[in-house]
Amino acid sequence: MQTKQVNLQVNIPHGAMLDLKAAPQGGLLVLLACHAVYDALTGRCLAEHEEDAPVYEAQLRYAFKHFEWRQTKPRWMMPTGAPTKTPPKAEGVSYIEWANALGISVPNNVTSEDYALTSTENLLFGVYRYHQVTGLIPAEIDVISWAFKANRFVETLNAINRWGL
């Protein structure tokens, strides 16, 4: 299965879309896999490699632009990630705070997923969170992450599809 990779975005191939027969499907989930915590008190990006903060900021800005470009209805953007740094704050919610600090307009259809620690959990918990806020399973998923993680996301979707729900 071939995956198209564009800059910071991982396009999950159409054949790998969710196919959960018992759940109503609809809309778009734009999932931003976070890799740092924004500390609003200090204005710093806390990451394993803090010198990569400009890359994480670029991913954040790109995710909001991508979300703006996609006109699918309904659509939700979801920064995803658990607390990983001190002070303890979930990566997902901290990225929304970071967007606000950067002056990015955060629409009402942006929410966070705050428990994922791995790429697999980013997608799995993101789909669950999407279902919590919409009552649907996303018909489309765009993941903003590192291109080298694309296969992890595709494998996770394939595993979900094999559940046969």
Image: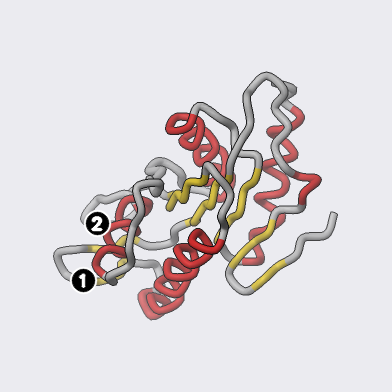
Circle 1: residue type: Gly
Horizontal relation, residue 51 to residue 31: left or right? left
Q: Nearer the viewer, residue 71 or 51?
A: 71
Quadrant, the C terminus = top right
Name which residue lies at 21% across and 55% down: 87
Answer with the quarter of the image where residue 34 lies: bottom left
Name which residue lies at 46% across and 44% down: 116
Q: Which residue is mark 2?
A: 86
Q: Name the N-terminal-most of marks 2 and 1.
A: 1
**Circle on res. 155:** none
Q: Which residue is mark 1?
A: 43
Measure the C-alpha gap from mark 2 to mark 1. Answer: 14 Å
Answer with the quarter of the image where residue 99 lies: bottom left
Q: How many marks?
A: 2
Name which residue lies at 38% across and 62% down: 36
Q: Residues within 10 Å of mark 2 (few under 14, many from 20)?
A: few
Where is 42 relative to 13, above or below? below
Q: Secondary structure at mark 1?
A: loop
Residue 85, x across and y down, in percent: 30, 57
Horizontal relation, residue 10 to residue 110: left or right? right
Circle 2: residue type: Thr
Q: Nearer the viewer, residue 106 or 17?
A: 106
- Labels 2, 1: front one: 1
Q: How is the image coloured?
A: secondary structure
Name which residue lies at 55% across and 46% down: 29
Where is 39 relative to 51, above or below? above
Answer with the quarter of the image where residue 23 lies: top right
Quadrant, the N terminus = bottom right
Residue 106, x across and y down, in percent: 33, 57
Q: Nearer the viewer, residue 133 or 165?
A: 133
